Image (cartoon, rainbow, N blue to C red):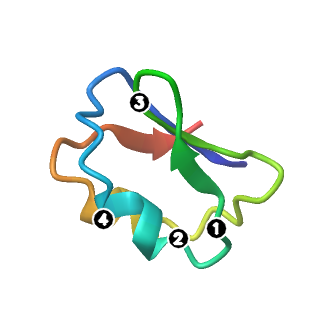
Amino acid sequence: MARVISDECVSCGSCEGECPTGAISQGDTKYVIDADACVDCGVCEGVCPTGAISAE
């Protein structure tokens, strides 16, 4: 199960640098998670200042 980023994302970039598999990248309006690369470690969720990341 991959993590997902909601519309609460403010594109701060905190999550991208913390992802151990590089599954997070900047999308058109917010950051996005590549579900195939995500290992569901939860590190990104812990560093998100707006709580925009959660389990799918």
From mark 2 to mark 3, how far is it between C-alphas? 16 Å
Determine which residue is flagged by label 3: 30
Mark 2 and 1 residues: CB-CB less than 8 Å, in contact?
A: yes
Please tell me whether residue 7 is drawn above or below residue 52 in the rendered image.
above
Question: Could you say which disc has been placed on residue 22 in the image?
Answer: 1
From mark 3 to mark 1, how far is it between C-alphas? 16 Å
Determine which residue is flagged by label 2: 19
Residue type at numbered disc 2: Cys
Identity of the residue furthest to the bottom in this view: 20
Question: Could you say which disc has been placed on residue 34 in the image?
Answer: none
The quadrant of the picture occupied by the C terminus is top right
The residue at the point 63 percent across, 62 percent down is 40
From mark 4 to mark 2, how far is it between C-alphas? 11 Å
From mark 2 to mark 1, how far is it between C-alphas? 5 Å
| Pair 4/3: label in front | 3
| Pair 4/1: label in front | 1
Q: 16 or 56: nearer the eye?
A: 16
Determine which residue is flagged by label 4: 46
Q: Name the N-terminal-most of marks 3 and 1.
A: 1
Mark 2 and 3 residues: CB-CB less than 8 Å, in contact?
A: no
Would residue 9 be found to the left or right of residue 22 on screen? Answer: left
From mark 4 to mark 3, how far is it between C-alphas? 17 Å
Mark 4 and 1 residues: CB-CB less than 8 Å, in contact?
A: no
Q: Name the N-terminal-most of marks 4 and 1.
A: 1
The residue at the point 30 percent across, 33 percent down is 9
Q: Position of residue 39 (x, y in %)?
A: 71, 66
**Helix, strand or loop under label 2:** loop
Q: Name the N-terminal-most of marks 4 and 3.
A: 3
Q: 42 or 5: nearer the eye?
A: 5
The residue at the point 74 percent across, 45 percent down is 35
Q: Name the N-terminal-most of marks 2 and 3.
A: 2
Residue type at numbered disc 3: Lys
